[in-house]
Image (spheres, rainbow, N blue to C red):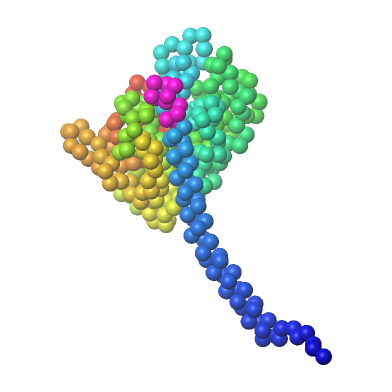
Amino acid sequence: MNRKRGLTRLELLIVMFIVVILIALLLTTRRPFRGRALLIKDQTQIKQTLAAWVTFSRDFDGVYPTPSLISGGGDTDASAPGPENLKANTSAAMYSACIMMNYFTPQILVSPVEPNAAVVVKDDYDWSLYSPAENIYWDADREGSPPPNAAPDYVPFATNLSSANLFTGSPICNASYAHNPLCGERMAMQWRDSLDSNFASLGNRGVICGNDKDPKIYNESVTLHFYGSPKQWVGHIGYNDTHVEQHDTFYPKGLTFLDSSNVITPDNLFRNDSENGDCGSGLGIDVFLTLVSDIADDEACSITTEWD
C-alpha cells in the first residue's frame, strides 16, 4: 500500500530558508526600482508644469503665468484695472492662478520626494472662488487674504517656507518647486516661451541664496535630502525649452551670464549673481530660483524669498 509522505523537518527548514532568501532578494531589487520611479515622477511633474506654462503663454503674447496680467493690472477693482501692478506676482498667486484656470492640479506641485513636512498638497483648493466679474482669478487677494466669497476658515494657497503664514501662524507651503521671481529684467527676458535651453525657470529648491561656501548653512538645509546624501544637494532643474536635468551642483555646466563687466560668469542656480548675490532683490538677468512670498516694491523688485 502506498502511503503519502509529508515533508521532514529538515526539508521544511530548507524550504523556509529558500523563501527567506527569495524575499530578501525581492526587497533588495525593489528599492532601486522605487527610487527610480520617484525620480521619474519628479522629473515628469516639473516637465508638466513647464509645458502648462508654455500652453498658457499662447494666450498671453508668449508670457508665462503672471498674476498681474491675468487680473488685468493686479488691482482689486475690476472696473478700473489700471497699470500692471507687479506686487501681485508672488509664488502663491502664480501657482494658484494656474490651478484655478485648470492648467494643472495642486498635486503636481508637491514633489514625490519632498523632505519638508511643512510642504503639503493643497487638497482643499476651492475652485468655486473663481469670479472674473469680481476680479478674482485665484484663491486670494493681492495681500494673500481669501476673497469675500470664501469660507470663514479657508486658508489660501501658500508658499511660506520660513515665514509664518498669516492664517496658521507657522510656515505652510503648497509647492515644492522654486522659480524665477516675476519682476525685473529677468522676467521680461525669460519669463516666457523663449525656448532657451540654457536658462532654468523651475526646479527643486536649493540652499538659501545658493550658499555652498558656509558648511553650517549648507549642511543644515532640508533641500539636501531630495535625492543626495545629507552632505550634497541633488535636484531636478527644468529649462525654458521644457527639458529637465538632474544636477548635483549649483553651477551646472553651460549655465552662465554676462556680469556688469560683460564677462561670462558661472551662474549659481539659487543666487542672484547679477545683483552681487542680493537675494532680497528680484532684479537681474541670471537664473535665480526661489519662492517669493511678498513683493514690497514693484519698481525696485524688493522681494521676500523663502528658503529651508
Residue 95, x across and y down, in percent: 49, 31
Residue sitting farthest toward the top: 79
Q: Is residue 205 above or below residue 132?
A: below
| Figure label count | 0
Query: Which of the 4 quarters of the picture holds residue 198?
Result: top left
Residue range highlighted in magenta: 53-63
Q: Quadrant of the N terminus?
A: bottom right
Residue sitting at 42 percent across and 25 percent down?
57
Is residue 197 at least partly visible in the picture? yes
Nearer to the camera, 242 or 2:
2
Q: Nearer the viewer, residue 139 or 299?
A: 139
Q: Position of residue 40 (x, y in %)?
A: 47, 49
In the image, residue 118 lies at what x, y percent? 54, 43
- Of all residues, the one furthest to the front in this rendering is 1
Q: Position of residue 86 (x, y in %)?
A: 41, 21
The residue under the point 55% across, 16% down is 132
Is 162 included in the stretch rendered in magenta? Answer: no
- Specify the quadrant of the image occupied by residue 286: top left
Q: Residue at x 25, y 36 (%)?
A: 257
Q: Is residue 199 above or below residue 87?
A: below
Q: Residue at x 22, y 34 (%)?
A: 258
* Residue 163 in sight: no
161 relative to 187 in the view: left or right: right
Between 297 and 89, the one lying in front of the other is 89
Does 62 lie within the magenta span? yes
Specify the quadrant that holds the C terminus: top left
